[in-house]
Image (cartoon, rainbow, N blue to C red):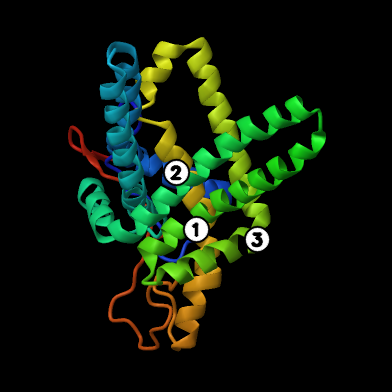
Amino acid sequence: MGLFGNYGNSGAGIPKYAPKKTGLALFFDLFFRKIDKITGLNLLMSIFLLPFPIAFALIRYVDNINILLALLIVLFLAFAVNIGPATAGMTKVMRAFLIEKHTFVIRDFFRGYRENFGKACIIGVVDVIAGLSAYACCKFYPYCAEIYNSKLFYIPLVISLSVLLIVFMMNYYIFLMLTATDLSMKNLIKNSFALAFVSLKSNLITTLMIIFFIILMGLIFLFATGFAIIILPFFPLALTWFIVCFNSYPVIQKFVINPYYDSIGEINPELADAGSDIDEEPIFEDMGGKEKPIEIRKKGKGKRIS
């Protein structure tokens, strides 16, 4: 007997049509099987976030204000132009995880970046502008409310933040549809806007989970800054996007991809069970889960021991 049991014995195998995991069971199964690749994706995305630490370093060490502003503008433009295509590349790999399709992380990441650069760049720039606008609103309207002593200024603040939330939830779908379909920019925006409301419950759950991770990372930075700096390149961003894709892609399958295949009389290949549509009797049958366990016999002195 081995230290952890006899691994020479064969079990019954895995049934070909075993029930598929769903919900949290499927999430953790995918996560732990792909954790090394998710970490790799986070490392790749960290490259496109380098403008932030570089900007902080420049602010600290560059004294010439004109040179500093010029360098900060270059870094900002580099980030705004590349963050959308980089997200498309990450989404392409994440989608492969979800549909159990083999993927090479680096190759497929940069393929998704390159193939979707134009549309993804526009989406990324719009997201950056929306984020800056929301930040400005959070500063401007409370300031006006205090100066003019009027709470009416909080009304446009609430409207602005509501619009930002809708744009934020649209991102749950627009990058997935960008990498999974050939939709035009107009239809990408229209569909993602509709799905932001159609699957509102799922979107709010996803948003709350993202907020939880942001708060968690904030607390780690506050109380364990060194540890936070170490894990930042490896963990939080890709895990957060994995949660987004896991919750959102079934919605796209249900309302976008499946209806397309229904319209042309075909079954979505991402959902079709292997062999489910084959009427012919198979020549060979997968016996996974049916065969009897096999024990390896060990040779002894003059007899065999099972």
Q: Distance between the residues labelled 3 and 1?
A: 12 Å
User: Which residue: 49% across, 64% down?
Assistant: 189
Q: Quadrant of the N terminus?
A: top left
Q: Where is residue 117 in the image (x, y as percent from the top left)?
A: 28, 56
User: What SS does tag 2 mark?
Assistant: helix
Choose mark 1 or mark 2, whichever is in front. Answer: 2
Is any atom of residue 87 visible in this view?
A: yes
Give the camera-side residue of 235 and 98.
Answer: 235
User: What SS does tag 3 mark?
Assistant: helix
Q: Which mark is residue 55?
A: none
Q: Which of pointers 1 and 2 lies earlier in the amino acid sequence?
A: 2
Q: In this view, does 76 lie above or below 124?
A: above
User: Which residue: 75% across, 38% down?
Assistant: 153
Q: Position of residue 52 (x, y in %)?
A: 35, 28
Residue assigned mark 3 = 197
Q: What residue type is labelled 2?
A: Val
Q: Do the residues labelled 1 and 2 touch (CB within 8 Å)?
A: no
Q: Is residue 189 above or below residue 240?
A: below
Q: In the rendered picture of this protein, how many numbered marks are placed on residues?
A: 3
Q: Where is residue 40 in the image (x, y as percent from the top left)?
A: 29, 37
Instruction: State left or right for residue 178 relative to residue 211.
Output: left
Choose mark 2 or mark 3, whichever is in front. Answer: 2
Q: In this view, does 46 lie above or below 59?
A: below
Instruction: State left or right for residue 211 relative to residue 104.
Output: right
Residue assigned mark 2 = 128
Q: Are marks 2 and 3 in contact (CB under 8 Å)?
A: no
Q: Where is residue 193 in the image (x, y as percent from the top left)?
A: 57, 62
Give the camera-side residue of 84 and 244.
Answer: 84
Q: Which amino acid does label 3 sit on?
A: Phe
Q: Which amino acid does label 1 sit on?
A: Tyr
Q: Which mark is residue 173?
A: 1
User: Which residue: 55% across, 18% down?
Assistant: 219
